[in-house]
Amino acid sequence: MSPASSHHSPTRTLVSATGPAGNIGDALIRREALAWAVGTSDELIVYVGDAPDVWLHQLGVPSGTRVLRSKRSVGRWLWLIATAPRHPVLMFESGEIPLDRGNVLRELVFLAETVLVRLKGGIVVRPPRGIRAPTQPAGALHALAARWSQFALWRDAESAALAKGTRVVPDIGFGAGIRAGLPATERRELIVSLRGARPFPSDDWCEAIRAFARAEGLGIRTVVQVREDEDRARDLADALGGIFEPWGDTAPLVQEERLRERYDAARLVVSDRMHVLVLAALSGAVPLELVPSPTRKITAAFETIGVRDVTADTERLTAAQMAERLQWQIARVDEITARIAAAATELAAVETEIRDTIREARA
């Protein structure tokens, strides 16, 4: 039952949920944010931009939702915000927010949307986000809009500081559901999934992966969670003597479930893709970013949930040192599992707080 069911006046929730269908992590966090919004109003409106039909299935958009497609519908989106009944809800996208110089106009529009909703007595929610490439004045506009929002959530302390925010919570992906997976003694795989845009790993890196897998009696499997990484996964499997599992023509939701089943059976997952590691950890696999000169993105997000040293910079490590780092990481499985459970609990509490705030605003 919606919060407005006991009132005669209608209510409206608007959710922005654009993204690439070929990135399962992006779909996952958009879906989790949409789930926070479902049932909060009589009318649900979702803007998906230029996304294909399959994106709607990935997000689990409920039947009866008004879906706005293509950039030509931006004017309609703004009109629906401006003409919304009292106490509307506006839910922005979760994930990484680029604030480079090309995004000034976009941030100005988002600020206007925020002010409109607040003037109508509505609720503005910015789900857990991280800031990328901050510049001015885009950063200042974003920070101002965040201050006007009842919920401006940040997935890492660095992003919160840039926006002068205070609310740091786990990345919303950690709320995607904890899975039991196989018992630790039955997990027989080491999974690797790396960005195709990075340089191919060094010979020492490959030797470290092979040596660790041999020592632990693990098979190596390379998987694809982002379509553009498929060629890299194939080449890695060749270099590591592992099994390559392509995405191919598999439907995205089927591919997502297949990946989660693979993580259910993995003892360790090595990746430089943040949501590969998030999904792996939700399945009870130990996550590790093992690359040269890593960014702060993964480190910061995992530090938010109390998991430190999830990233290892291989720039100056020998093959033997990398293998030792892999060995050290798998010994942390109980610590990491406990932190993942706490993060999921915290996100559930945040959702409850948002829903309670919406009900109170309309009471």
Image (cartoon, rainbow, N blue to C red):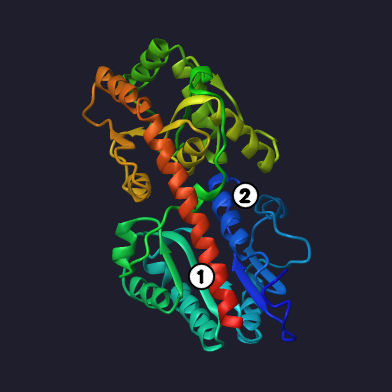
Which amino acid, by three-letter code, is at mark 2?
Answer: Ala
Q: Which of the 4 quarters of the picture holds residue 63?
A: bottom right
Residue 103: where, in percent of width, then height?
Answer: 43, 69
**Is 42 or 220 nearer to us in this picture?**
42
Residue at the image point whose x is 49% and y is 75% from the top: 110
Q: Is residue 23 visible?
A: no
Mark 2 closeness class: few <14, some 14–19, many ≥20 residues within 10 Å: many
Q: Which type of secondary structure does the marked residue at label 1 adopt?
A: strand
Q: Quick one: quadrant of the N terminus? A: bottom right
Q: Which type of secondary structure does the marked residue at label 2 adopt?
A: loop
Q: Are marks 1 and 2 in contact (CB under 8 Å)?
A: no
Residue at the image point whose x is 66% and y is 64% from the top: 38
Q: Is residue 122 visible?
A: yes
Q: Quick one: quadrant of the C terminus? A: bottom right
Say which mark, if any, is on residue 21: 2
Vertical placement of residue 87 versus 245, above or below: below
Residue 33: where, in percent of width, then height?
Answer: 56, 59
Q: Extreme left residue here? A: 316
Vertical placement of residue 168 versus 139, above or below: above
Residue 175: where, in percent of width, then height?
Answer: 53, 50
Residue bearing the label numbered 1: 125
Residue at the image point whose x is 61% and y is 80% from the top: 88
